[in-house]
Image: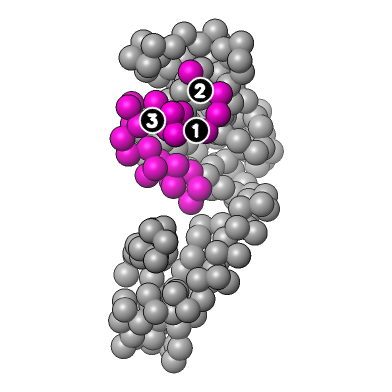
Amino acid sequence: MGTQKLELADGEVLEYVLTRSARRRSIGLKIDHSGLTLIIPARATIADAERAIRAKIAWIRGHLTRLKSLPPPPPALLHNGAAIQWLGQPCRIAAPAPRSKLTDNILALASKAESPEAVRDAFIRFSRSTARIYFAQRAAHFAPNMQVNPRRILLTSASTRWGSCTAAGDVRIHWRLMQAPPAVIDYVIVHELAHLKEMNHSPRFWAEVEKMMPDWKNHRQWLRQYGATLHG
């Protein structure tokens, strides 16, 4: 049945995945890094699912909060023929190849061997070299409209954040974001550029983000739900 949304009493909107199972006689709840999943019996309704969520909301919130503090599980190893996302679009890896390039949803990687380690190293090299150019171009697109002037657009490999900004004007964006949809990348870039005006997460900061991206909450949610699946 796919992704559903439930507005709670305090105004919070909880997203969850709803599936049916002919074998189940009661409603089951599962929480992992992808979020909340409900498995309901064949004859149960969405209203039944929503009642189950409200009855267990304290337990659900507790587990979701705990998972956010834990490192995400690593994605599957890369290999020749593996499926992967690039700028939000599915493609397949071809390795080893004479040189790295993306053509017709085939990501050729110039690796020294076909081992997962060699393919991963080649993927990181290609991602970083491409990200330097792409991120700089997107930052140059937004900066004038935001009336900011970043000193440098750099790459990061930080394990706890997708981007950062220093008071000196250095903006760092994680190279793994090249796998995310373009709008998600733009959100992270706009987020960090907004810190050049507001070095905090105050209402004034979010107002700066919203000027450029009224739907920024959707992109933040994408990162929370799918960020762990990005390779790197």
The percent position of residue 4, horizontal first and vertical second, equals: 34, 64
Circles 1 and 2: CB distance less than 8 Å? yes
In space, the residues marked 1 and 2 are separated at their CA atoms by 8 Å
Q: In what element is the residue under mark 2?
A: loop
Q: Is residue 133 left or right of residue 2?
A: right
Query: Dot 3 surroundings within 10 Å: few (below 14), some, or many (20 or more)?
Result: some
Q: Is residue 151 magenta?
A: no
Q: Which residue is mark 3?
A: 207
In space, the residues marked 2 and 3 are separated at their CA atoms by 10 Å
The percent position of residue 74, horizontal first and vertical second, equals: 64, 49
Q: Which residue is mark 2?
A: 198
Query: Dot 2 surroundings within 10 Å: few (below 14), some, or many (20 or more)?
Result: some
The percent position of residue 59, horizontal first and vertical second, equals: 57, 71
Which of 46 and 185 lies nearest the eye of the viewer?
A: 46
Kindly identify the residue that appears in the image at 45 percent across and 83 percent down: 27
Circles 2 and 3: CB distance less than 8 Å? no
Q: In what element is the residue under mark 3?
A: helix
Q: Which residues are magenta?
A: 197-225
Residue 141 visible in this rendered orientation of the protein: no
